[in-house]
Amino acid sequence: MNDSPLEGAVREQRLVSAFVEMADTLVDDYDIVDVLYRLADHCVTLLGAAAAGLLLADQRGSIQVVATSSERARLLELFQLQADEGPCLDAYRTGEVIEVVDLSAAKWRWPVFAPEALAEGFRSIQAVPMRLRGQIIGALNLFGRETGPLSGQDLEVARALADTATIGILQERAIRRGEVLTEQMQGALTSRVIIEQAKGLLSQAATISTEEAFEKLRNYSRNNNVKLSHVAEQLMRGEVRIDAL
Amino acid sequence: MSESGELSLPLRDLVSSVLAALREGDAREVAARVGRACLARLPIDGVSLSVMVDTGHRQTLYASDAVMEYVEAVQFSLGEGPCFEAFQTGVPVLVPDLASDAGQAWPMFATQVATADIGAIFAFPLRQGAARFGAMDMYRRDPGWLSDAEVATVLQITDIATSALFAASAGGEDGEISEDSIMELTRTRAVVHQATGMIVAEFAIPAEQALARLRGYAFATGRLLDDVAADLVAHRLQPGVIDT
């Protein structure tokens, strides 16, 4: 499924920096949604995925998109389709890695999702469950442009990235007895909704695409060292001026 | 937990019951029906629902007993406590053992409620992203967590409550509220959130009002909220037309 896999030493170096960056964000005061966006980006760089997304259990029986490697509207819709059916939902429900080496052979399995994904030019998919002590809180989803499996080593990296995301979500607040994750999960899902709202606001105000609006939000958040979800919320409440972005 | 995010039958009953109260334009009755549904389906001893009347201020629409009324009153006079926090931050606050958990986070609140017969408090915000409508709070005499299945039920009820109380506050839709319109906010796509932001930008109004306008426009034109939102985001519809 790799588009342009990095080779040898370069790849190893990138891998190390990715995990160091993740570790840094976990010990510092950070924004879980921003960490998840970075993780999705790393999946594209390190694993040669054409697109990556993280979906969290909404605790009502389905899953919702929280972060993606690209905010392209069609791609978001494609990830979100999996609230009803698709490999990511299956990974979440079964707790197994779902590997689809040839999507065109999976139309019977996901009659809505598979044709839509094929139409967008994707040929293979991996979905890796995010686990915590036997409980599954979501799944990491990788889309590839070529048919075929991930290498064993890449699958290990994907698993490690999914585990890192899980730890990130849990650490946002001290885990009280480690039983219920409702505060963290619902908080992350709400942040995602506010980011979508802020993307709409900014795209309308500045006459730019929602994708460009997201980049502006993200840059402002990084340059000013403010949490992404915080910028989005302030913008929606009129507490940050639009031209500041 | 239901299999595909579909509502289980008892919650469908709640939707119809809430709908009937909405048609009579009675927000307090809507809140009462939601509250009684919580008492019937969850291992709790009391529940309350409050809505935001203007920035930061809230009005309790329903409290099932005197303990819940007391808990609400204490928090809003002190400006601290789990329900107050859920209301302010928009994140659920679950306190499975009030006696041991509350002292550090909310010292004044802990002192005030020490003599009340409360083991656990669970507070859930009613919101859609930046649009905040209120909160639903519950307590139990015995300490302990809610199970995953109970959390799923609470979240489905908060979805219904958010949508219903929102419809009640938006008003002007008498006779036009349907089961679909109660459910549409509970399964929204990204375009609805983006369209809400666009309306906020166009008219410089709060997110709650923007969402109300979007819904009102969808009603008036006999279309689905999702479709109106998709047209706005794709620039097939200009936000300026969503003006009332």
Image: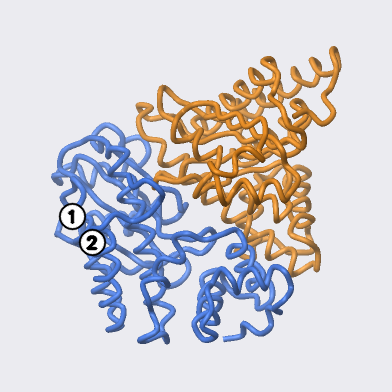
Q: Which chain is blue?
A: B
**Disc 1: host chain:** B
Q: Decide: is B21 above or below A85.
A: below
User: Which chain is depicted orange?
Assistant: A
Looking at the image, which residue is at 53% across and 58% down?
B129
Proximity of marks 2 and 1: CB atoms separated by less than 8 Å: yes
- Please identify the quarter of the rendering in which residue B234 is found: bottom right
Can marks 2 and 1 be said to lie on one chain?
yes
Q: Residue at x 64, y 24 (%)?
A: A158
Q: Which chain does tag 2 point to?
A: B
Image spot of residue A196 (x, y percent): 63, 57
**Residue nearer the viewer, A235 or A189:** A189
- Please tell me whether mark 1 sits on a helix, a strand or a loop: helix
Residue at the image point whose x is 78% and y is 47% from the top: A219
Which kind of residue does numbered mark 1 sit on?
Leu
Residue that numbered label 2 is attached to: B35
